[in-house]
Image (cartoon, grey):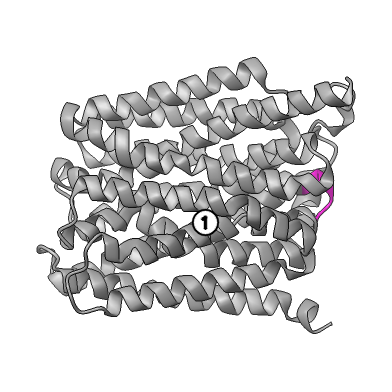
Amino acid sequence: MRPARRLTRAHLVWAVGVFAYLCAVSGRAAFGVASVEASARFGADGTLLSMFGVVQLGTYAAAQIPAGLLLDRLGPRRMLVLGALTMTAGQALLALSTDIPTALAARMLTGVGDAATLVSVVRLIATWFPFRQVPVFTQLATMIGQFGQAVAAVPFLGLLLSAGWTAAWASLAVLLLLGMLLVIAFVQDSPPEQPGASPVPLARPGQLLRDVFTSRAAWSGFFVHWMCLATVNSALLMWAVPYMTALGIGAAQVGTLMTFNVVVMVALGPFIGVLTGRFPHRRPLLGWIAGVILTGTWAVTLLMPQQLTAWQLVPLFTAMAIGSAICAVGFDLARTGVPHRAIGTATGMVNIGGFSGALMSVLLIGIVLDLRTGGGAATLADYRAAMASQLVLMAVAGIGLWVTTRRRLTA
């Protein structure tokens, strides 16, 4: 294949993979904007409502290493198809669910399918693009994929409020099926002239796990991802909408803020990608910058005594966008710190960081809410106290990042 033709094909494969990831993010984020309706539909209090996020995020995090191992053996095309099918089943089941056990099973399916998606896209990029371009295209992929949050916040929420629960979730199932069909039609694991770059079962799972879990770079990526995404995913996937509802912010303004969050992420993505490629030894510093911005902005927002407007939440959503933009640096740390055969497994391990942190954050907020309210209606003061509790997890991420990078920084 001629270079120009290969480049065109690489961009097509990348675009389809990114669309599949956008569809997955839509299914992942939709429950966060539907949490108020879910509470009414299933009669769930704060702790029980948080279990939906815990089950989804827990399943997603637990499935990362198995998904990475399968990816390194089966290839990204098959994994993208399997992920889309599993998530479609989850959305369809949730559309029809009327009881909590069924709804929780649906979110488990969503978490399993979601786990196969981003790691597959990252592997495609590492195979199809030149080494120096990989950070930029990885950043662009993760940023554009986050438009799935806007899909959840605007058309999905609008359909949920106008047409009801079943129609809204069924629409996400159709979107995921469309993404799967495009993957089948256009995605290949590797360029035709490089069949050896296609994932094949050369290494045993034990060897892949040793490659990853003995890598300081992979652990650094894990903690960068945690620091950047723990509070962000906790908010966007579960607690932002109830918190903003307590502030008296309407659905239209919620959708505007979430869309703004995605636009800022996408704008920052290429810039972060260029910095990552030009200054690879400074990648952990980007994680520290995101952590300081997020922690400081959350603290200031939650300490403000007055009833905040949507405009006053713009700094918080900007900070969350910065965290989301920088989180992909964790994937690049892992990618350059493990053998090529283990990139899928390493990407899965890094992904565990942000989502396991978010899982703990979601559960912690729900527990604090119930301790303060006794199962009753939560006030704005209750939400402020509960949301503040997650800052403990930022400190844990900071300690982990310091431990895994201090030798490199002092060398």
Q: Which residue is mark 1?
A: 324
**Residue 152, x across and y down, in percent:** 35, 39
Q: Residue at x 25, y 53 (%)?
A: 49
Magenta stretch mostly in which secondary structure? helix
User: For the magenta stretch, what is the residue range?
Assistant: 338-342
The relative height of residue 33 versus residue 317 in the rendered view (above or below) is above
Q: Residue at x 72, y 50 (%)?
A: 135
Quadrant of the rendering where the C terminus is positioned: bottom right
Q: Is residue 360 magenta?
A: no
Q: How many marks can you see?
A: 1
**Residue 253, x across and y down, in percent:** 24, 50
Residue 271, by quadrant, is: bottom right
Residue 213, by quadrant, is: bottom right
Residue 55 visible in the picture: no
The relative height of residue 106 versus residue 192 in the rendered view (above or below) is below
Q: Is residue 339 magenta?
A: yes
**Residue 82, x across and y down, in percent:** 56, 27
Q: Residues within 10 Å of mark 1 (few under 14, many from 20)?
A: many
Type of amino acid at the residue the image marks with label 1: Ser
**Residue 59, x across and y down, in percent:** 47, 47
Q: Residue at x 71, y 60 (%)?
A: 275
Quadrant of the rendering where the N terminus is positioned: top right
Q: Does 120 sit left or right of 48 as displayed?
A: right
Q: Residue furthest left?
A: 376
Q: Nearer the viewer, residue 347 or 314?
A: 314
Residue 194 visible in the picture: yes
Q: Residue at x 62, y 54 (%)?
A: 328
